[in-house]
Amino acid sequence: MLLTDAAVDAALPTSVRGSLAELPKLVLPNGETSKSLVNLGKVLDFLAANRLDRRAVLWVVGGGVMGDLGGFAAACYLRGIDCIQVPTTLLAMVDSSVGGKTGINLNAGKNLVGAFHHPRAVYIAREFLATLPPREFAAGMAEVIKYGLLGDVALFGRLEQARLAVGSEDLPAVIRRCCEMKAEVVRADERETAAEGGRALLNLGHTFGHAIEQVTGYQSYLHGEAVAIGLAAATRLSLHLGNLEDTDLSRVEHAVATHALPVRLRTPLPVASLMEAMQHDKKARAGRLRFVVLRRLGEAVTQSDIEPGLVETVWREIGAV
């Protein structure tokens, strides 16, 4: 079976469309709101209606939303069938298609229902990026910048110097490097059970970013745009903790802005609402939030003893009220 969204289906290259033409196909609306219980039910019902058995393979062609939804459906149907991910966005190529995390959103928060279900394979073809709107490509760059900040100073330095674009000669190497870094982290802490650090580090910027998405109803920001603001916020938090210098914050904000991404909220959001949204973050332990902060550019740690007042200060510095 083939699962995709309306935007991808309309833009599929003829060669890809022809090779998948005989598969039963379900096309869902694109956008974050598709990661819902309702659409999960639609995928599962479609699998059952086509009488697919445990030898079936679900091909998921699309961005992170379809990858998360399709991967979770594959994990659930008949207690698990094979899934092949074909990411069509930069964000999905460098991050969400790799690592086995699948899931959907609830009204209470993002990715609160899901499963670990690794795909049988991930096929990445940069040709898909030629049909990607510039805003979507930029959103994917937030995750690329994240990997540089987490553990590759050379990668971060490259992103500081010049904007990475669809036609950049080193784009395939950058995509491969991000996948390698994620694979290293996942191998060491597949199910995010490490007491400190581990796979949770991959959420640098995401505690802030997910709160922005939830408070705005997943309508105002693409995921990568919210993460970009989250990276700036996490860097500010690290600065307040005494880990970084002002010049470090300037470097991060420059790298983010160079790739046409925001470092502040476009319109003010209530601090109280953002703080409430953070309480549903999956990294929380015993009711306390855990943040991913930077010790220095290229090294991150998790920290849970951060005063809420300091977090509120950071929110206000990036435009919350």
Image: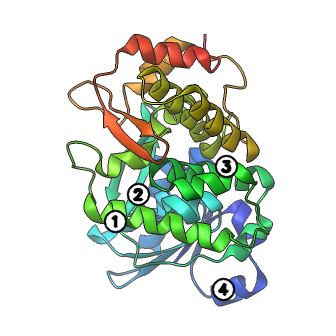
Is residue 61 visible from the viewing direction of this image? no
Q: Quadrant of residue 6?
A: bottom right
Asked if marks 1 and 2 touch (Cβ < 8 Å), the reply is yes
Residue 178 position, x and y percent, is 52, 63
User: Of 22 and 111, which appears nearest the observer?
Assistant: 111
What mark, if any, has residue 117 been given in the picture?
1
Residue labelled with disc 3: 139
Q: Are marks 3 and 4 in contact (CB under 8 Å)?
A: no
Q: Which residue is label 2 attached to?
A: 102
Q: Indicate left or right for 311 with 283 as reference.
A: right
Foreground mark, 3 or 2?
3
Which is nearer the N-term, disc 2 or disc 4? 4
Where is residue 242 shown, x and y percent of the image? 42, 23
Q: What residue is rendered at 34% in x and 21% in y?
A: 306
First reached walking from the N terminus: tag 3 or tag 2? 2
Mark 4 sits on what residue? Answer: 21
| Mark closer to the observer (4, 1) | 1
Say whether marks 4 and 1 touch (CB < 8 Å): no
If you read the primary sequence from the N terminus, does the residue marked by circle 1 or circle 2 appear first?
2
Image x and y of residue 104, in percent: 44, 49
At mark 1, the secondary structure is: loop
Residue 147 image point, x, y percent: 51, 54
Count of labels shown?
4
Q: Give the amino acid at mark 1.
A: His
Q: CA distance from mark 3 to mark 4?
A: 30 Å
Q: CA distance from mark 4 to mark 1?
A: 26 Å
Q: Is residue 213 left or right of residue 277?
A: right
Look at the image and tell me in which quarter the C terminus lies. top right
Indicate whether 271 appears above or below 128: above
For the residue carrying disc 1, how many other residues have a C-alpha within 10 Å: few (<14), some (14-19), or many (20+)? many
